[in-house]
Image: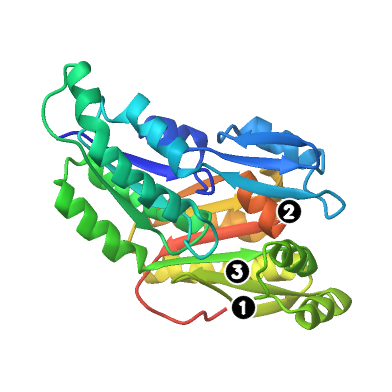
Amino acid sequence: MSTVLVIDAACDLPPGFIDDRNIKLLPIAIRVDDQTYTDVKDAQKLTDFYAQDRLGRNHDAESIPYSSEEIERLFLDELVTEYDFALVQTVSRKRSPIYDNATKASHAILRSYHDVREAAGRDGNFGMRVMNSGTLFCGQGVLAAFTSDMIERGKAKNEILKLADAMRQRIYAYLVAPDVYYIRERARKKGDESVGMLTALVAKSLDIVPILSARGDDTFPVAKGRGFDASVDRLLRYAIRQLEHGLLTPYVVVSIAGDLSGLESHEGFKALQSTAASKGVTVLSCVMGLTGGLNVGPGSICVAFAAEDHEFDG
C-alpha cells in the first residue's frame, strides 16, 4: 500500500525536505489589501514577501485556506490515482478551519473516488485520515517529519496512525514575537480575544516579550524576557537543555518570519545547531509560512521538538 503525507501551508519545514519526502501541500492564500498571494513554501518568495513588509499592521490582511470543495478536487485530480492512503495533518483546529474543511472533504472523496481510480486503471480502495496536530507552525513540522520517517520505513498504515497520534501529544512548540500587540490585533480581527488588550499594552510599553507555547490546541505564555532578543535566547537555551536530556524524534524545527540570517544572528541558534549535531539530531530551519507570519508578525521565531512530558524550565 502506498501512503502519502499531506500538510497544510501553515506547517513549517524546509522546501527541500518537503520535496525529498514527497510530502503534498494544501496551499493557503493570503489576502493583503487588494492583492492575494499563495504560500507554496518557496523560501525566496517568502523571504522577499517579508522584506517588503507586506504584513505590517498598517495592512489589512487575512488568510484564506482551501475550502472543502478545493481539497476534494485536489485529491480527486492528483492523489487518489497515485496513492492508496493519505494522512492529512493540519494546523490546530482551534486556529483554522482547515481541519474541519479537510474532514468534510474526506467524506465526499471517499464516496466518489472509485470511478476516478477505475478510469485511471488503478485497482483497490483508497483511504484517508485527517489528523488535527493540535499545534502550530514548527510543531506541525516536527509531527510531519516524524510521520514521513515512518512512511519512508514502510510502516503499515495503522501503525503510522497510532505512532503519529501518540507523537502529536509529545510535541512542544514555542514562539517569540517582537510585537505582542500585533498578535492581539490580528486575533481580534478574527474574533479571538485570547490576547487581552491590557497584556498587550503592558508588554509593549515595558518591552516585555513573552515566550508562547502552542500545545494541545491551546496557546499560552510560559515565560518572558525584557526585549525580543533576550526572550529568543532564553528559548534557545531551553531547547538546548532539552536536546541534552534527549528528544523523542531526531529533529528540532526552527522558523523565522523573515530572512534566515535573522536566526544566525543569535548565538543561541549556533549553539543549538552544534549541540544537535553532537546528539545526532537534525535542525530543520526555514522561513515561516505566510499564515504564521500573518498571525504572529514579521520577525517572529518559532522552535519545536518532541519530548517527554515536562514543564518549561527556561
Q: Which residue is mark 3?
A: 235
Q: Position of residue 165 (x, y in %)?
A: 28, 61
Report the Cα–Cα distance between label 2 and label 1: 18 Å
Q: Which residue is mark 1?
A: 221
- Dot 2 or dot 3: first in sequence order is 3
Q: Which residue is mark 2?
A: 299
Query: In this orientation, does residue 177 appear?
Result: yes
Task: Determine the secondary structure under disc 2.
Answer: loop
| Amino acid at the residue labelled 1 | Pro
Task: Determine the secondary structure under disc 3.
Answer: helix
- For the point 42% across and 30% down, which residue is it? 19
Q: Residues within 10 Å of mark 2 (few under 14, many from 20)?
A: many
- For the point 14% across and 46% down, which residue is it? 156
Q: Position of residue 233 (x, y in %)?
A: 66, 66
In the rendered view, would you say 138 is above or below 201? Answer: above
Q: Residues within 10 Å of mark 1 (few under 14, many from 20)?
A: some
Report the Cα–Cα distance between label 2 and label 3: 15 Å
Report the Cα–Cα distance between label 3 and label 1: 12 Å
- Asked if residue 85 lies left or right of residue 219, the reply is left
Colour mapping used in the image: rainbow
Residue 169, by quadrant, is bottom left
In the rendered view, would you say 291 is above or below 116? Answer: below
- Dot 3 or dot 1: first in sequence order is 1
